[in-house]
Image (cartoon, rainbow, N blue to C red):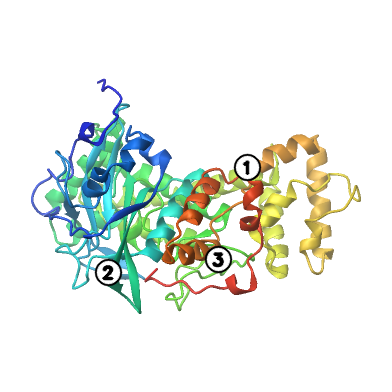
Amino acid sequence: MFFPAMATLEQLRFDNTYAHLPAGFGARVQPSPFPDAKLVSVNPSALKLLDLTPEEALRPEFVAALGGAQPLPGMEPFAMVYAGHQFGVYVPRLGDGRAILLGEVRNAAGAKWDLHLKGGGPTPFSRGGDGRAVLRSTIREYLCGEAMHGLGIPTTRGLGILGSHAPVYREAVETGAMLVRMAPSHVRFGTFEFFHYTEQTEHVATLADHVITEHFPHLAGQEGRFARFYAEVVERTARLIAQWQAVGFAHGVMNTDNMSILGLTLDYGPFGFMDDFEPGFICNHSDDRGRYAFDQQPRIGLWNLACLGEALLTLLSEDEARATLGTYQPTFNAHFMDVMRAKLGLREAQDEDRALVSDLFACMAEARVDYTRFFRALGGLASADGDGPSPVRDMFTAPEGFDAWAARYRARLAAEGSVDAERRARMDRVNPKYVLRNWVAQEAISRAEAGDFSVVDRLLGVLADPFAEHPDAEAYAAAPPVWGRHLAVSCSS
């Protein structure tokens, strides 16, 4: 099917498959627009996914349509219902409490994107809440979605931020805002759990066939499709979390309602990119038991997939579910090691690789070396010992342990016939110079709360290409300043 390239809002083509599912999948609801809403930042690369020109974002109709004041023809605002295991405890009914699916847009290439308004006011799933979002959390999600995309990690995307002077009451009075985010789907593990635990088995099948038809079309109508679908979700999730671990990213709230059925990074709250390497890093101040600590994420991924598997037991056998879960750890291990070899500039797989990586992590943890800066600097390590200064060695307060590891690493490079300049170029393509550190996000938030969104827009450009040199943004690649170390971020973020 061919569609001409779009140019205006009015030409957006809506194909709202989710809102047309049977009753019980959610509720039709109208957003509650801010009376003074204005566009404060827009993401040009996300506009392109909708075939919209940048000029469209300058029209007042852009804010009116995406902020809920003047829906576009074809929009059918809908709040999705789901459940989930939150910190290991099953909560039977959650749903879009402060988010509204405005509609599904199909672009000229045939790809479909949910337009999801976060902070659009109360829905039947708000559980007494106001349905609003605050500027602080909106900026964090907006920037981190683009940071993850720039890193090549599957994620939801941010289209733009709508600002307002309206007060929103949290622990303190904060500034209200809305985020328009995009994804091919916002279906979660918890969506399946809701229908399973309410014994709506026909809706479990309806949901599975919907997701397969829209997002796994190669399985549609096939015998054994549900088992094969589950297997692909397991694989995508394993690969996603392997990428998180390799880049030093902690999600913070890996509840099953925050797990994407497509293997996307979903629902950015108290996330954190590690500064100093700490395997037990807890980025969520509310996670007092460390359930979602950095080193627990692979295990929690498996636990969440087991919850999903149970929710699918009316569609596949227990033996099929168990066998599929058994593929998670090997998939995670293989992909993690592939990514780590690339980060180390290694081109060949060897049995010793796992020990080489784990021993490096032990050295880094003991010295609390900055994770991102270390791997970026490692590309400059000379393969010949003593061949010039070693900034990466200087990151270790007691470098003897690193020296022993570096001798093994250099031997490995020599065995591969590695050439330093070529290796550094490869490593710089996979080891980012820039990640969205909490202190960097906080600086953007503080400026925005004072009315200046220039840092948000500047970071958007830097994080879109985190492997490149950005001479005017060197400060964002530095270790955190004293005030920015150990910033507390909670579930309210």
Q: Secondary structure at mark 1?
A: loop
Q: Nearer the viewer, mark 2 or mark 1?
A: 1
Circle 2 residue:
90
| Residue 205 position in % (x across, y down) | 18, 46
Front in this rendered view, residue 456 or 484: 456
Q: Nearer the viewer, mark 2 or mark 3?
A: 3
Q: Would you say residue 224 is visible in this rendering?
A: no
Q: Amino acid at mark 2?
A: Tyr
Q: Is residue 380 above or below residue 492?
A: above
| Residue 106 position in % (x across, y down) | 26, 33
Earlier residue among tags 2 and 3: 2
Which residue is pictured at 61% across the width and 44% down the height? 467
Q: Amino acid at mark 1?
A: Ala
Q: Is residue 320 left or right of residue 333?
A: left
Which residue is pictured at 14% across the width and 39% down the height? 73
Q: Residue furthest left?
A: 23
Q: Amino acid at mark 3?
A: Trp
Q: Quadrant of the C terminus?
A: bottom left
Q: Secondary structure at mark 2?
A: strand
User: CA–CA distance between discs 2 and 1?
Assistant: 43 Å
Circle 1 residue:
468
Circle 3 residue:
439
Q: Secondary structure at mark 3?
A: helix
* Quarter location, residue 11: top left
* Quarter location, residue 170: bottom left
